[in-house]
Image: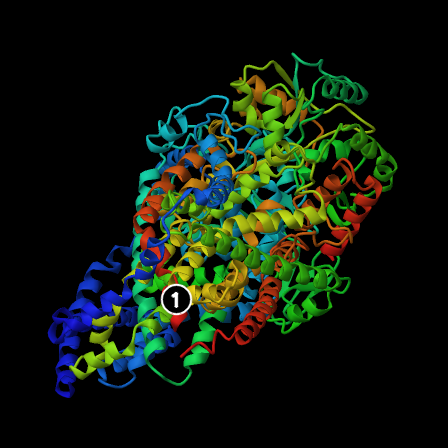
Amino acid sequence: MTTHEQAFERAEPQAVERRGLHRPSLSGDWWRHLIALAACFIAVFPVLYVASAAFNADQSLGGTNLIPRSLSLENFRELLSPDPAKSQLQSSTSHYLRWLGNSLIVALTTSVLTVLLGALAAYAFSRFRFRGRRLGLLSLLLIQMFPQLLALVAIYLILLRTGDVFPFMGLDTRTGLILVYLGGVMGVNTWLLKGFFDTIPSELDESARVDGATPAQVFWGVVLPLALPILSVIGILSFVGTFNEYVLASALLQSNENFTLPLGLRGYIDKQYTEHWGPFAAGVLLAGVPIMVIFMSLQRFIVSGLTQGSVKG
Amino acid sequence: MSVFSGVVGLAIKIALLAVVNGVAVWGGTVLASDEKWFALAVLVAATLAIDLIYLSPRRAIPLKFLVPGTVFLIAFQIVPIVYNVNVGFTNWSTGHILVKSEAIAGIQRNSLGPPPDGAAYSMAPARNADGNLVLLLVDDTTGEQFVGSEDGLEPLGRDSLKLGEFGTIETPPSGYTLVTGAELLRLDTELSRFTVPTESGAIRSEGTEAALELAPTLRYDRVRDTFTRIEDGTTFRDNSKGAFVAAGGEELEPGWRTNIGLANFSAVLTDPLIREPFLRVFLWTLVFAASIVLVSFALGLFLAIVLNKPTLRFRRGYQVVLIVPYALPAFLAVLVWGGLLNDDFGVVNNALHTNIPWLFDPWWARVSVIAVSVWLTVPYFLLVSLGALQSIPSELVEAARVDGGGPFAILRRVTLPLLLVVVAPLMIASFALNFNNFVNIYLLTAGGPPSDDQSVAGATDILITYTYKLAFEAGKGNDFGLACAVSIFIFMIVASISGAAFWKTGSLENVR
Amino acid sequence: MQSLSKRTIGVLVVIAAVLVTMLVVAGPTAAAAETKIRVWTDKDRKAAVEKVVGAWAASKGLSVEVLEKDFGKIRDDLKTVQPESAPDVIIGAHDWTGQLAADGLVLPLFPTKATRAQFPSYALSAFSYGTAVTRLYAAPVALENIALVVNTKLVKVPKTFAEFQASALAFKKKANGNLAVAVPQGAAGDAYHMYPFFSGLGGYVFGRNKAGNLDPSDIGVANKTFLSNASQIDAWNKSGFLNSKIDYGVAKDSFLKGKAAFWITGPWEADTLRTSKLSYKIVQVPSNKFKSVPFLGVQGFMVTKFATTHGLESAAKDLVGSYMMRPDGQAALAAANGRFPANMVAGKAVKNPLLAQFGKAGVGGVPMPNIPQMSSVWSDLASAWVKSTKGSGASKARTAFATAARNIANKIG
């Protein structure tokens, strides 16, 4: 029990609060606000054009002015409750909510598994000394540098063959897509996690080991709980990454009901010259909401967790 | 700790292993019934290895942690690389997709054409009194009626069968029964191969309601493995590069996919289309990737320092807003920026009252693609830096300040070195990512504007977009073999630069 | 721990056995499926394809599986698809014909004479390909081409090219922000929309050999006639008649806001025009040195080689080569994405004046070359236009197009 408490104390980012205390904020912060506001402006500026397209019945993107010629919610209506008679796509249904559901399932599963598998590997790299360890770590990063664009055909074929044997995880299945995403688990994530694990004193492990715990028990019972901040950060990064992923999904998913959100929305703009930017932009805006909510609620973890402690490693 | 002790942990482990084994056994039976022995051997070996690793206590402990991630790494990262290397040795490209036997069949099929005065018929498949497949035929021009069998054409009396609205045969003559519905579907393959020999060729079905006389223009000699053009006797031989070619260079389509050795790799080194602009494209790729990383990191760090004051008002709000570019699909943002940066009509020039050729001047276009990529990347480094800054012990900063260091001296001597230890691996990874950042370039400038040296490579083409141009927008398009060969080169380049950077920055030394 | 492992193995074996039986029972029993004909189509036409193919299939006792794909991905995915999941029938653009036929992925079709007579000959030849003798590889369904849309409130419909140029420039001078001609290019260029200007000066992409087939070694991007007329382009650039900085969004926006009196676009904008409340007329770009004809595009359905593998060759050929070429199916399929039907009988019944005007503006047009070497042309031809019409700092058109021709020849190899 005591080991637990000690550990949690250590993991809390106390420095943050402490440092601020004896220098209360004064109007001397004006320059910080100025810079922050300018940066925020640049960050959000293009997004305003996406919003403008979403509320514009014109179907165009960017145009030359920000204020739409005709302000309307038509695009959102088309997206959410498509009326076959009025829909500009004429095909009967838009499956926005279904796509959203697919994206959430795929992204959540992937991010949870990414965290788990990444942590397992990082723990091995952090705690054990074995042959090929340094080479392994280095190759993890280098392998990720292969241009993904060109690996598509191979991935497609692998999944197709998998599907011959295990239909539930072949092409055009969410399971299959998740499996492919898991191929990218080892890499930067493992490095980040390993860096964090390095900062958790190995005395904690050792005392648990003396108490008779197996390495697995140490991992699940001691190390993982301590690493919660970094785990949630990696979870979020992986969530956002898979939620917006287009290239792999488009190569592997085939039927509309299995589409993830970016793939489904692409249907609105897939043809040269006849892009329906309106519903597309509306869809992107709506999809951004859950992402931003997750960001806001876990912000504390992000800033304190991303590289916390690995400095001291 | 009780949750993970003994029984429960063991139960979970057994359950997971059982699933793995169950799935493997099932997969094994499928593979065995399909006679895919190699795949079966791999599956059995992998399953046994996994069982062995997890069932032997106190041994191979690191492996127990590494196996789950590694399985996916091998399946979806390493196997594709190996596959790409293999494709790099083939001529897989437009016109070379099929295997040879399919290509021969395709050439034979394409060589079939209506001879001069060849007849066309309305057709209905039927069975004769003996139950054999025959074609009931009505000549489209003369209205004569026939029964076609594999022995040849036999005339029927005029009007012995009746035609429907679209010229389809609806009533067979006596002694014949029409083949329809499900039976017709079952006979589809037989019907499509069915030929009724005639003087100038053979009558073949075209669909299920028409037939026509077709004669080949080429003849295949199975023994010599050559095609001969019937008209003039030209012989086409297998050129061992996946095509039948005549002495004069005329080539039959389709060709087939075959191993062509190092041809693609040597093309990378010798083809002037690749060689001439290579140095310029390569240097620009380096500059592109490196400046994105450096500028993004500098800006991210700067913003992090600005925001790194816990008592700052609206701090969380600023952070949320600054993350926005990261939460949008990148391709959408790039397209929007393309509109904003338009030289004559874009918002940026309008607002600044400038007339900068953002996308049309080679140098400005380079600035633009870097700037947009930076816009997309800064949030990542902002997050990284915020986290890293907070983990730098404040005592160190205080000590430096007491020693009389100014803010910049502190940044340079204390903050940056500590920060770099953490961020260097992330920067190298980001460098590699941007080195192959196809989307940003392709959607913003498509590699353009045309560069001043008049070559095929545009001013903003990086190696991967130029590869795309060479492999998919040159020749007959879709040269997968060449694309894979080039991708191997690119991979080696990035990997060696990154590897060297790891060495140099000491990121690896930091590994305890 | 040692003693555990024996027990573990025992437990494992039991559980594995249970799992296997469960999976085997639940698993591949559903695999023995009914005969299905699989069609790949784009989103716009999915519903229409389902209807038309469905009606045919019902009469044949078949069921249909219509899969929706990005239009452009249909061609690329056909090259990597495996037989098991491959389509029997695809929708495609005529300029894919060369690649797909050279690949051996699509089957030649022989529609009856009566059927062929219902189609304009260029629609059939657009889908015909062969190095020595050509074969037809698709049932043409829909036609499209670009045209000059004139805002008749702002200018008169020009009769000659000189009139066109004068009135466009006069309109441009009227107000700041006005465009002479809203023809889209952008940084990457757009050789397709520029084609009328190109053909009007005597440019062509590929010539034809003795057999009448497109000849990839005869590249007309910088032919003598064109080069001798190319100084016109420099003049257009100088006067601002053409401006490569206008991209698709700007062109459309400007025309709709009355800041451009001339817009070059195609039938995909028919709905936009109809709802725009502008007065407009759709015509061919007036003749310059030559007729300023546009590229013609034809879309249609093809039978893939996989239909043979699936034992559906005759059925698929019946569907595409006969059923889909009939007037009723054509009308439904073409209407699904607002195009003019390729079948002329169906075309007569089209009461849409807009589509009719677009059709008339395409008379004499050139089908986009359908040989695979065309993939070497697009980007360089577009670059030549971008370079020579980018305002200040533009290169001489003569040099730009000569460079393009050289690069294209190099790329074709």
The quarter holding residue B328 reads top left
What residue sits 53% from the left and 73% below the top? B505
Q: Amino acid at mark 1?
A: Glu
Q: In the drawing, does residue B392 fall left or right of residue C266?
A: left
Viewer-nearest residue: B383 or C23? B383
Instruction: Please give the chain letter of the residue carrying mark 1.
Output: B
**Quadrant (top left, top right, bottom left, bottom right) of the N terminus of chain B:** bottom left
What residue sits 66% from the left and 32% below the top? B353
Q: Residue B414: in sight, yes or no?
A: yes
Viewer-nearest residue: A40 or C38? A40
Q: Residue A178: in sight, yes or no?
A: no
Q: Which residue is mark 1?
A: B395
Viewer-nearest residue: B510 or A133? B510
- Indicate the position of residue A189 as horizontal and vertical percent values: 39, 65
Q: In the rendered view, would you say A144 is above or below C79?
A: below
**Quadrant (top left, top right, bottom left, bottom right) of the C terminus of chain B:** bottom left
- Indicate the position of residue C284 as horizontal and vertical percent values: 70, 24
Label 1 CA crowd tier, 10 Å (few <14, some 14–19, many 20+): few
Q: In the drawing, does residue C254 fall left or right of residue A231?
A: right
- Indicate the position of residue B320 as horizontal and vertical percent values: 39, 45
